[in-house]
């Protein structure tokens, strides 16, 4: 359910920037979502289709790009990507890790007419 306020923010940002650029229509939003993000593409799309009705963003395509996550081992400092759901450091086998990247969610760009 947290996708609704996120999608509302996306729409507000897109409309603000498109209108400032004098756009007649928003064609596409390019979104980047990290592997560790809890954002669900289908939910964002569902809410987008509802809340963009009657705006210059109605019918705009949402393009989702998923990016891999990386972890850093607290014990040895090794930075690594996870293999499946295995969070064990490949160097020292420690399970004490922190997220370095992949928890992001951002609007990369907006395509307008």
Image: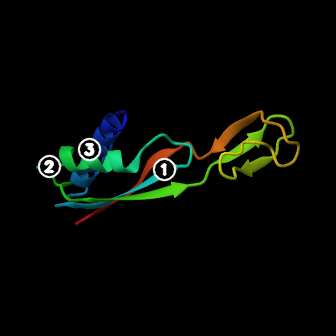
Q: Which mark is residue 47?
A: 3
Residue behind mark 1: 33
Image point 37% across, 33% down: which residue?
2
Q: Tell me if 59 is positioned left or right of 1 in this view.
A: left
Q: CA distance from mark 1 to mark 2?
A: 24 Å
Between 43 and 48, the residue placed more toward the observer is: 43
Between 80 and 29, the residue placed more toward the observer is: 80
What is the crowding at mark 3: few (fewer than 14 residues within 10 Å), some, or many (at least 20)?
Answer: some
Image point 76% across, 48% down: which residue?
79
What is the crowding at mark 2: few (fewer than 14 residues within 10 Å), some, or many (at least 20)?
Answer: few
Q: Residue furthest left?
A: 54
Q: Secondary structure at mark 1?
A: strand
Q: Tell me if 22 is positioned left or right of 72 in this view.
A: left
Image point 16% across, 55% down: which residue?
56
Q: Position of residue 57 (x, y in %)?
A: 21, 54
Q: CA distance from mark 3 to mark 2?
A: 10 Å
Kindly check if marks 3 and 2 are in contact, taking CB atoms under 8 A apart as contact: no
Vertically, is 2 above or below 52? above
Q: Tell me if 62 is positioned left or right of 70 in this view.
A: left
Q: Tell me if 57 is positioned left or right of 72 in this view.
A: left
Q: Earlier in the sequence, mark 3 or mark 1?
A: 1
């Amino acid at each position: 359910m947290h996708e609704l306020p996120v999608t509302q923010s996306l729409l507000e940002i897109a409309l603000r920037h498109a209108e400032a650029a004098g756009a007649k229509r928003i064609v596409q939003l390019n979104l980047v979502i990290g592997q560790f993000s809890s954002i669900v593409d289908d939910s964002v799309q569902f809410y987008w289709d509802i809340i963009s009705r009657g705006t210059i963003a109605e019918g705009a395509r949402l393009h989702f790009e998923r990016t891999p996550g990386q972890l850093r081992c607290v014990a040895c400092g090794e930075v690594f990507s996870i293999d499946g759901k295995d969070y064990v450091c490949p160097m020292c086998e420690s399970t004490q890790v922190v997220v370095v990247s992949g928890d992001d969610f951002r609007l990369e760009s907006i395509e307008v007419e």
